[in-house]
Amino acid sequence: MSHPVSFLPKWGAWYQADGTTRFRIWAPHYEEISVVLEDGSEMAMSKDEKGWHETCFSCQPGARYSYKLSPETLIPDPASQFQPDDVHGKSAIVDQHAYQWRTPQWLGRPWEETVIYELHVGTCGGYSAIIKQLDALSDLGITAIELMPLSEFPGSRNWGYDGVFPYAPESSYGSPNDLKALIDAAHERHIMVFLDVVYNHFGPEGNVLSQYIPEFFSSDRQTAWGQAINFTLPAVQDFFLDNALYWLNIYHADGLRLDAVHAIAPQSWLQDLVHKIRARCHPERHIHFILENENNDASLLQAGYSAQWNDDAHNALHVLLTGETEGYYGNFAQNPTQDLVLALQEGFVYQGQISPDTQKPRGQPSADLSPTSFIFFLQNHDQIGNRAVGDRLSTQIDSAVLSVAHALLLLSPHIPMLFMGEEWGTKTPFLYFVSHSDDLNRLVREGRQKEMAAFSAFNSQEKAHLIPDPASPETFRRSCLDWAERNQPEYAEIYETVKKLIAVRQEHIVPRLRNARAASSHIWAPGAFAVSWRMGDDRLLELFVNFSDTDITMLTGYAGVVLYRSDHQDRKINHTLKSHSFIATLREGSER
């Protein structure tokens, strides 16, 4: 099996085997558009009745080009496949046939085997630098890396959610072939690669679509990040459908994580998207689609999406571990233990109830969904980076409590996700950083301070200076991982514990995940509970969890084969759950 490089997106410049390049752009209110090359030569495009402008002529890979909309207006290609000179520069022709894949037969891995490692390519050193870490990630037990958004963004420092060229992998990280080499190298190690894509908005700087093709956007709807995209138009739908297929079939990605889909309307487009993609990919490939969705729409998970980032589970656990209740954590302040247990059993905490922060209903019933429909995490880029000083969980809680949290994360039937450096408990912050133009940097800086003023630690002018400047190169530098740190003795215990937990998961839990379902739960005290699932082979997976500072007496004790237990747990006493301890068992028999 090989991925079809004959795939031809409807938008953009596509270099073809005969040495010609087809150029195509949708701009219905322009009558005349031409392609202008860097040597000044110009080729007129023909326009059809639907607003598409197209031409085809001999043009070699690497050539720079622009679209001429008027004598005074030249723009990069909105569907550019490479922006070597950043968002305001010319676009470059890419020969997508040139890279010679070493793993053309790769089909991916089943979803149940997934252990995700989210990373930011820039703070890891670029595409090529990540290749050097793949052996260590494979040895750890990681089966999928999830790359934060790669779409070309302004400057060289950005989380990626300000991208404006969805087909162009970020040039400051390396070339398109460097990205392909990373994906190829991951596949050689049986590691899947998921790409985080942003289909709900474009960034504020370099967005040529909003400036010159206003039809692409809704005139009457805004998102939290800017003008909403008009998904009612076929040309717009094609732009994003083809973009998904482009990453999957040309770059051989194994799946996509769709950012903030609650900002996309109509939602029916999302349901159509996953079916259209699967119909145009090799039927034997394991392709996975992940959602971020504040609305907790169980219907999308029932419609073919693999899983959703479960913010509810994270938020309940975070409140339980840290006691923080400001901001959206207030929605889980009343009984975080109960909320966490509900999330472990049924997925969403909010399944239609009124959310205290908005006073509106949120979510849909999710108890019928598989546990693998939910991605569980202790940390991610949002939950660290949206904190004012980017502090990680390892700096907020005791190491014994963190160890219990890692055990719960990696041995529950939900799909686990680690954020880069978490596996050794790094204290390196992950801060919010940008590199826009000066005026926009100022607005971002002011907006960040205003946002953080809602929190007591930063709610005065005197405290505002504590918030790192997002536009400062130092803010980015402080967020860069030191990979050698994981070899230091102070981090060895956390690293070895995480590695052991992943190994237990792969041996005992993964083979039983298909058709797993929630069984029962019991809460003894705040932070102390048991939760169980009936696994696919009808055995009962039971997790006994005690985050509290006191020992808990369990009247019935625990039975079955012990898969994992905290080192300080007394092996001779099976009816006492020590403080800050965890036990996982697998047994036959009826539900508790």
Image (cartoon, grey):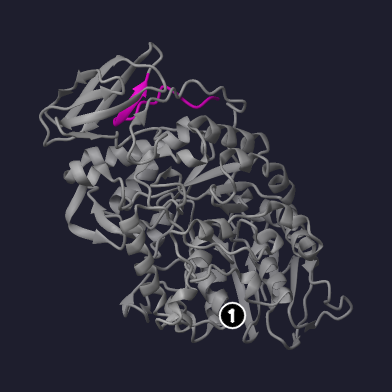
Residue 193: quadrant of the picture: top right
Q: Residue at x 47, y 78 (%)?
A: 329
Instruction: Identify the image quadrant of the C terminus.
Output: bottom right
Q: Is residue 124 left or right of residue 198?
A: right
Amino acid carrying mark 1 in the image? Thr
Can you give x and y, in whole percent of width and height, for residue 244 in the image? 40, 40
Is residue 508 among what the camera can see? no
Magenta region: 1-15
Can you give x and y, in whole percent of width and height, for residue 353 in the image? 38, 77
Instruction: Identify the image quadrant of the N terminus.
Output: top right
Can you give x and y, in whole percent of width and height, for residue 69 in the image? 17, 32
Q: How crowded is mark 1: few (under 14 residues within 10 Å), some or many (20 or more)?
A: few
Q: Residue at x 49, y 60 (%)?
A: 309
The magenta stretch spans residue 10: yes
Q: Residue at x 29, y 34 (%)?
A: 76
Can you give x and y, in whole percent of width and height, for residue 99 in the image? 53, 23
What residue would you read off at disc 1? 322
Q: In this view, does 329 lie to the left or right of 47?
A: right
Describe the element under mark 1 as helix, strand or loop.
helix
Residue closest to the eye, 385 or 298: 385
Q: Is residue 22 above or below residue 149?
A: above
